[in-house]
Image (cartoon, helix red, strand yellow):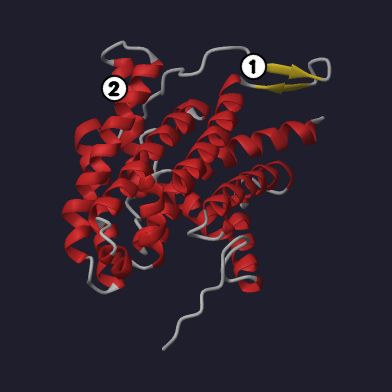
Amino acid sequence: MTFLTYLISGISLGSVYAIIALGYTMVYGIAKMLNFAHGDVIMVGAYIAYCVMSYLGLSPIVSVIAAMIVCTLLGIIIERLAYKPLRSAASLAVLITAIGVSYFLQNSALLIWGSATKIFPTVVAGDGVSLFGGQVRITAVALTTILTCVVIMIALTMFIKMTKIGKAMRAVSEDKGAAQLMGINVNGTISVTFAIGSALAAIAGVLLCSAYPNLMPTTGSLPGIKAFTAAVFGGIGSIPGAMLGGILLGIIEIFAKAYISTQLSDAIVFAVLIIVLLVKPTGLLGKQIHEKV
């Protein structure tokens, strides 16, 4: 039963990685850029939720909504100020700008909230679910995290396939020039993509800090890198790939901590990624793209 407990913990952690990875993979799939500031948006979302619950005394649901609103606006502002002027620039310039935005958000958070460890309030209340006569217990946080990931995955897939904005996203992803000629607002579509990704980052930040209350104030750094790894693992640009990569990465990390070493778990995670990319460079569900030159 210990194995099953670890498996559930891995799926729960992987679900958080998957939600974060969706933001990475959407931005890359549509704007063809790597938004390395995405991990720090997670941090901002967690802090906003923390402030709403701790200082204002409002409910967890209100705190999550507030975090989503702030992170959505933050994502749009970052895209408009930092990335939009570099739409036609070289990829290296965009990459350096993304790293700069990441450092700006990190240092701004340090100035506003300080570096002292903060305990994140309880967001999900409840005793969870017990299985096999109490031998296996799924906490309320783990259950909520897994269900949230599944709901987000289904809703996002339906949104992209069935809505007008979703069709515009797919068109921009295929060919920005052709999409613009067909009357699609490319800049607006990319802004919507950043907004959705940032809102998901806020949810992921709250869920992550709910599961690991002592993680603050460095919420976004390492989890953001791991979620990016999950996106690449599953096939960056693929929404199902982001979910698969995130869950597999979470399972690998938990089992590495349980059966090998807590100190080496991160190294094992990245080693598995290297092996996968050597065998299949596009990731597990990524598609090989052939370009004419």
Q: Judge left or right: residue 58 versus residue 254.
A: left
Identify the mark nearer the N-term, 2 or 1.
2
Name the residue at 64% across, 49% down.
Answer: 248
Query: Which x, y percent locates residue 163?
Result: 41, 43
The answer to whether residue 95 is above or below residue 6 is below
- Say which of marks 2 and 1 sits in front: 1
- The amino acid pointed to by label 1 is Gly
Q: Which mark is residue 73?
A: none
Query: Which x, y percent locates residue 84?
Result: 20, 59
Asked if marks 2 and 1 touch (Cβ < 8 Å), the reply is: no
Name the residue at 62% across, 45% down.
Answer: 247
- The residue under label 1 is 128
Q: Judge left or right: residue 26 versus residue 51.
A: right
Distance between the alpha carbons at the discs numbered 2 and 1: 26 Å
Which of the pair 271/188 is nearer the observer?
Answer: 188
**Quarter residue 32 falls in:** bottom left
Q: Quadrant of the N terminus?
A: top right
Which of the pair 115/121 is nearer the observer?
Answer: 121
Which of the pair 287/93 is nearer the observer?
Answer: 287
Q: Judge left or right: residue 239 versus residue 57.
A: right
- The amino acid pointed to by label 2 is Cys
Query: Which x, y percent locates residue 52?
Result: 29, 19
Residue furthest out toward the bottom: 293
Q: Which mark is residue 51?
A: 2
Element class at badge 1: loop
